[in-house]
Image (cartoon, rainbow, N blue to C red):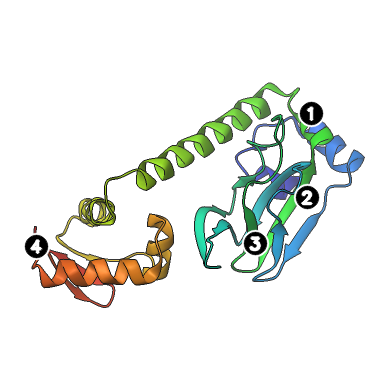
Amino acid sequence: MINILKNISLFRNVDTLLLKNVIGTYNLQNRIYNKGKTVHDQNEVCSGIDVILSGKLVAYSLTSHGSETTVFEFTSGGVVGANLLFGDNNKYPLNIYSIEETSLIYIPKSAVDTLLKDQLFAIEFIKILSSNSQGLNRKIAIYTQKSLRENLINYLSAQANIQNSKTIYLPISKKQLADHLGVQRPSLFRELKNMKDEGLIEINNRIITLLI
């Protein structure tokens, strides 16, 4: 268990004896969630943090029509619940489930309290809080843009810069892109078609060429 945790940035520099004592005192164990398994329900009280060892979790919201929009993704090394644990309103604002088999370690609040006495752990914990806050700010920026087209152009332009080409390969599926932009798939497909008809882009499945 110690070797597993030491591979996670949050615990990498924590005193080994302290970590060993926490593992024994609080009986920390791996938890496995199969694909599609709910990990936390919306409005459930957050009583600890989940450290992801492998796999992927998503936090999603349900629209009035019953479809879901992905708000956050948590992958290996990610920590769920850090920004909620010590808040006055410490309930999960979103549903969280596994989109593939996921292994994680649940650490109760009392154990986190003990670990925070270690300065290096505290620094890494603050980094996680900052990273989560930045991720939320990016989502807010996306949702408050003037239009879906502007968000879409910004995303495609960013990928063009990353891939150093006007012709890009979408690194995620169109469903995932719709979730990323906070819209439904029909809206995304309709806007892509409109942009193609207006001569702004060319589309061949996940290959898109920017003509602007």
Q: Which residue is mark 1?
A: 113
Q: Is residue 64 left or right of residue 168?
A: right
The residue sitting at 70% across, 70% down in the picture is: 34
**Disc 4 or 2, which lies upstream in sequence?**
2
- Tell me if label 4 and label 2 are in contact, CB under 8 Å: no
Query: In x, y percent, where is residue 178?
Result: 39, 63
Q: CA distance from mark 3 to mark 4?
A: 38 Å
- Element at label 2: loop
Q: Name, please, the residue furthest toward the front.
A: 64
**Disc 3 or 2, which lies upstream in sequence?**
2
The numbered disc on residue 97 is: 3
Q: Residues within 10 Å of mark 2 (few under 14, many from 20)?
A: few
Kindly identify the amino acid type of the residue bearing the numbered disc 4: Leu
Q: Which residue is mark 4?
A: 211
Query: In x, y percent, where is residue 8?
Result: 63, 44
Q: Quadrant of residue 118?
A: top right
- Element at label 1: helix
Kindly identify the amino acid type of the residue bearing the numbered disc 3: Tyr
Q: CA distance from mark 2 to mark 1?
A: 19 Å
In this view, the mark in front (4 or 2): 4
The numbered disc on residue 1 is: 2
